[in-house]
Amino acid sequence: MRSTTKTILFISALLFSASLSAQKITQFRGPDRNGIYNETNLLKTWPAGGPAQMWKVEGVGNGYSSPIITGDRVYVTGEIDSIGYLFAYDKKGSLIWKKKTGREWMENFTGSRSTPTLVDGLMYVETSMGRIICFDAIDGAEKWSVEMVNDLHGINVRFGYAEGLLVNDNLVYCFPGGPDTNAVALDRFSGKIVWISKALGDSTSYTSPALISLPSCKIIVNFTIHNIIGLDAATGELLWSSHLKGIGDIHGNTSLYENGCLYFLAGSGTGAVKLALSGNGRTITEIWKNETVTDVHGGFTKAGNFIYASQYKPRRYCSIDAATGQITDSLKFDKGALILADDMLYLYTEKGMVGLVKPDNGKMELISSFKMPVGTKEYFTIPVISEGVLYLRHGSAMLAYDIRAK
């Protein structure tokens, strides 16, 4: 009997791991971190009160991280009484388990920040206090942990660590931001240091790094407090950097690479920038810069020849011609986060409004909208779409909406 039980558990684990690895959405802002979700057959308009709500859960704690959805589970982080947790729910909103991650940020905008990253059955979580933990995604067992401040000489920032950890092959990358350990690559199975990069010795920011794959190398792109940098993913060598204008440190937008060009938006005064990356990845050349773009942390995405983003001042959304850098249209719908799926933009404003927008060669048409039925204060979490379901989070509440076309 005991042998049969072990066999069943083993088979279940294999099936679960297979379902995890087959999923598309396993990290912050979608499979490629560009805010694009490869979904089809979604609603092109919503009822007056919004799409049908499938379920709502309370009690995920304070936080701004997005959920990740894979297999038959939904994972999210949150803080309760200063302690962070990783929660695992089924797709009906029932709690499967929750595991402690450690102390979370309690000075301002309290709660968890970082969206988990899931790779082949292993979950990687970073707390706002700088603890990195690897969990087994099946049962939540902790595999290893590293402290970015104590172990990696990192220096935390004024709103707490916030990156969604980047994993490539057998490495997990983090940015402690210390003068001698600006970036670190860890073995994702053991947590042991593989390389350390001083880079420019600059403090870190709040951005989740991006990965660029070239024929000759792979490059990690991320912000520090004063620069955007490109590191060799295999060695940590600093390949190039670009100094940012202004003194603001709230860089929260992951950069986007496409067809030899790198786009980034920094709200410190630098604005929107397009860089040409050399074929070997070792040099950059500025193509254009638009300092009037003030997106801080809502993310941006690209559809066709246009970039879509939020404006911090004035509070609205805008489109940017990717060839010239000029703003081509704006939408007065406050400001906030946005993602793209099935040729439609999904907006989630800092005041809790959710909008469905049709982008058309730079033009933006608001088709439908509704107000999130829970919460007050800031709505900072970036939405997620998986298998025709829109997931929205505000603080301790997480809601799932059916957006499939019938």
Image: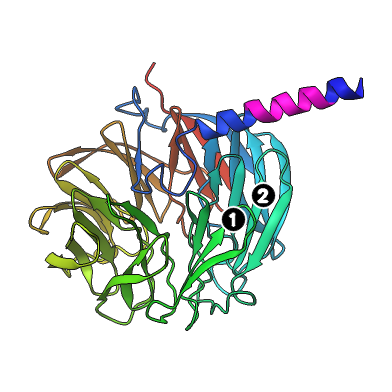
Instruction: Look at the image and say whether residue 218 sits in the magenta stretch.
Output: no
387 vs 45, left or right, is right
Instruction: Look at the image and say whether residue 7 sits in the magenta stretch.
Output: yes
> Mark 1 vs mark 2: which is more N-terminal?
1
Q: Quadrant of residue 253?
A: bottom left
Residue 103: percent from left, percent from top: 68, 67
Which residues fall within the magenta stretch? 6-15
Residue at 35%, 46% (x, y): give it. 35
Q: Tell me the CA gap for discs 1 and 2.
A: 8 Å
Residue 361: percent from left, percent from top: 12, 40
341 vs 183, left or right, is left
Q: Residues within 10 Å of mark 2 (few under 14, many from 20)?
A: many
Q: Is residue 72 visible?
A: no
Q: Secondary structure at mark 1?
A: strand
Q: Is residue 248 visible?
A: yes
Residue at 49%, 56% (x, y): give it. 164
Answer above or below: position of 154 versus 10. Answer: below
Residue furthest to the left in view is 324
Of the residues shown, which amino acid type is indicated by label 1? Val
Q: Secondary structure at mark 2?
A: strand
53 vs 329, left or right, is right
Q: Are marks 1 and 2 in contact (CB under 8 Å)?
A: yes
Magenta span: helix, strand or loop, mainly? helix
The colour scheme applied to this rendered structure is rainbow
Residue furthest to the top in view is 406
Q: Which mark is residue 135?
A: 2
Residue at 74%, 47% (x, y): give it. 141
Specify the quadrant that holds the C terminus.
top left
Q: Residues within 10 Å of mark 1 (few under 14, many from 20)?
A: many
Residue 68: percent from left, percent from top: 52, 42
Q: Which mark is residue 125?
A: 1
Of the residues shown, which amino acid type is indicated by label 2? Phe
